[in-house]
Amino acid sequence: MIDGDVLLDRLRALGRTVVLALPNVAVALALLLLFWLLARLLARLVRSVVTRAGQPKGVQIVLGRLTTWGTVGLGVLVGLVIVFPGVTPASVFGALGIGSVAIGFAFKDVLQNLLSGMLILLTRPFRIGDQIVTGSHEGTVEDIAVRATTLRTYDNRRVVIPNSELYTNRVTVNTAYPRRRLSVVVGIGYGDDIDVAKRVVLSTVATLPGVADDPAPTVLVTALSDFTVDLEVRFWISPPARREAVEVQDQVLSALKPALVGAGVDLPLPTQQVLLHDQTEDGDGDRARQREGWPPAPARTPTSDHAPDRKAPTP
């Protein structure tokens, strides 16, 4: 059992140690504040230099954050040395070296995402504001951070995707180029003139305001389907954003239907032909009696065109 006097002496010694350490704590806090202000100044300077170098906004943001974290981390190390004089930078780095394996396993995903984010910012496969498709997600890139990229979907939801997934998986950038080609398929009847249908389609699509003049729209026969001849209408839009793509497709389809119908071009609906077997239990297996399609009508006795055939009355 601990003696009360001994416990009181230990508390008094601890109190004296804390009082003696207060000036060091105050100096450490003041230095930490100074390092924080220095970090903000250096981050602003780095962003300014990166901007003058012509780098995109994402690179400016990430390099500014790395500069801030590095400067503040250095300030924390200096503060620890001041508060605890027995702690030296060599001992701190030695402890980090001993635990580097454990830290590597614990922060493997974080470091992988960090490296992937830096590579994305340096190689620039896409930028902030681009519209991309990755996996089952599609939307506009809002931010490229150190750990993850933020995507805003078209139905106004936020998707946070780790940078390692974006760097190792396939990504489709819809706004990488100033123009984008779209296409719609229109089916005409087999009895319609293909050249006439093409002329109607081209003349109609060329007048729409959302369709680009160069390259010009084209029409190609892509398939002879079960009940239609499929025409693929290809046209270009600029800018290539998702909103413009949906709106121009709506304009094209809305204009082609009345134009083709007005020109006498058929837009057939799906049709099916049902064939019945003339099959009974008596004729099962007899291919001569099992005919595809409708069985022939039974022979009829010739009758008058104006009156039905009737038997003569018995005298």
Image (cartoon, helix red, strand yellow):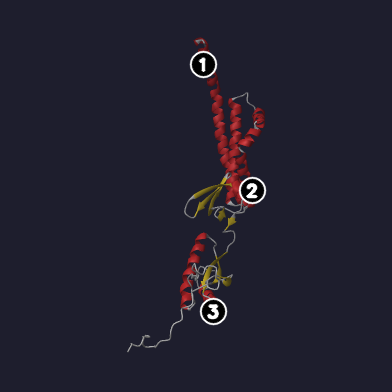
* Secondary structure state at the residue bearing disc 2: helix
164 over 82 or under it: above or below:
below
- Identify whether 151 is placed above or below 83: below
Give the residue furthest to the front.
Answer: 315
Residue 247 in view: yes
Instruction: Looking at the picture, tell me which residue is in the foreground, 117 or 275.
Output: 275
Give left or right: position of 21 versus 310: right
Q: How far apart are the two marked residues, 2 and 3, measured between alpha carbons?
A: 55 Å
Drawn side of residue 242 relative to residue 81, left or right: left
Residue 258 in the image: x percent, y percent?
A: 46, 74
Q: Which residue is mark 2?
A: 119
For residue 60, which numbered disc appears in the image?
none
Q: Nearer the viewer, residue 266 or 116?
A: 266
**Residue shown at the point (61%, 31%) measured from the top left:** 77
Residue under circle 1? 11
Which residue in the protein does label 3 denote? 193
* Residue 6 image position (x, y, % from top left): 53, 11
SS under mark 3: loop
